[in-house]
Image (cartoon, rainbow, N blue to C red):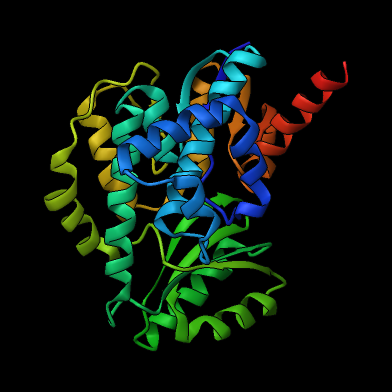
Amino acid sequence: MSTAMVFPGMGPATFAEVGKFMVVNPFAQARLAEAREVLGYDVLAAFSRSEDAYTEAAQVAFVVNSVALADWARQTLDVAPVLCAGPSNGLRAATAFSGALSFADTVRLTADLARWEAEYFAQADNADLVTHSFVRTPQEQLAEMLDELGERGEWAEVSSYLDPGFFMVSLRERNLDWFKQRIRDVGGYSMYTMRPAVHSALLEPQREHAAREIYPKYSFADPVLPVVADHDGTLVTTAAGMYELHMATFVRAVRWEAVVRTLREQGVTDVCVSGSDNLFRRLKSTKTFEVLAVDPDRALRHRRTLVRR
């Protein structure tokens, strides 16, 4: 048996859903204390006041919880990963857990990126960029939809290839209703829309700013646990590779099946999905492994079981 630790991309997780875990779990308390020391404010309190799923405090809380749950799984469930993956925003937790950055630096980086993201998407040219997820849509018909938009002079691009028929597409919000209707026309089903947009070549200015103004403050190390790149499945084992992976996540689409292929090639049989997740653990390709879902609810249930004993 060989296990990979997978940190999922960030989906909406409110304080009401995860706050109790953050208050009572000792691993979460320890990571929160580190984050408070680094940022100079109470992350838990700021998160409890967040009105948006992707505020700075919400993004930091997601990293805190993902890493704390991995700590808990190692200590309590004897999970012993040989490598890790962090698709989309899960890369930040994977970076800390793998040892490529300290947890403190990962928290700082997450906060820096969240602040710049808010500023970037407040600009008029970028305010209407969204990423829409949907299922049961053949790739050939998706290509036709994108061609239709292109013929109208409108931009759109695939941001994530998650499973056969399951995609995320970035586009202008003014085209979203039309796009949803076209998905229905081919028998597909729309799921949710993310604001701001992610993983798109149109975000090259955001990547350039981050490379110039944010990342020079951080020094990556060779990861102790290799990290599987979410855009092509490359096994990243060097500090330079981790930096390039962070640069790629701004502009390269997530290709989850490439990650799965590499995990298979590396002999992985089990994956532990660490963090609030309603997506990656449920993908058909993920279910080809033995999946252990480690989320706040599981940690709380485990604690209640111990108390009853």
Left or right of residue 297: residue 147:
left
Residue 225 visible at all: yes
Identify whether 150 is placed above or below 93. Answer: below
At a point 76% along the width and 25% down the height, the residue shown is: 302
- Which quarter of the figure is the N terminus placed in? top right
Identify the residue at image location x=18%, y=48%: 214
Report the residue that reaches farthest toward the right.
308
Q: Is residue 39 left or right of residue 12?
A: left
Quadrant (top left, top right, bottom left, bottom right) of the C terminus: top right
Residue in view at x 29 percent, y 28 percent: 101
Point out residue 130 in the picture as x, y percentages from the top left corner: 45, 71
Compared to residue 48, the image places residue 184 above or below, namely: below
Point out residue 46 in the picture as x, y percentages from the top left corner: 46, 54
118, 87: nearer the viewer: 118
Above or below: residue 153 compared with residue 42: below
Residue 308: % across, % down: 88, 21
Relative vertical location of residue 88 with respect to residue 147 in this rendering, above or below: above
Residue 106 figure quarter: top left
Number of marks present in the image shown: 0
The residue that appears at 55% across and 25% down in the rendered structure is 27
Instruction: Note whether residue 229 is visible.
Output: no
Nearest the eye: 86 or 150: 86
Instruction: Please provide percent x and percent y for residue 73.
Output: 61, 21
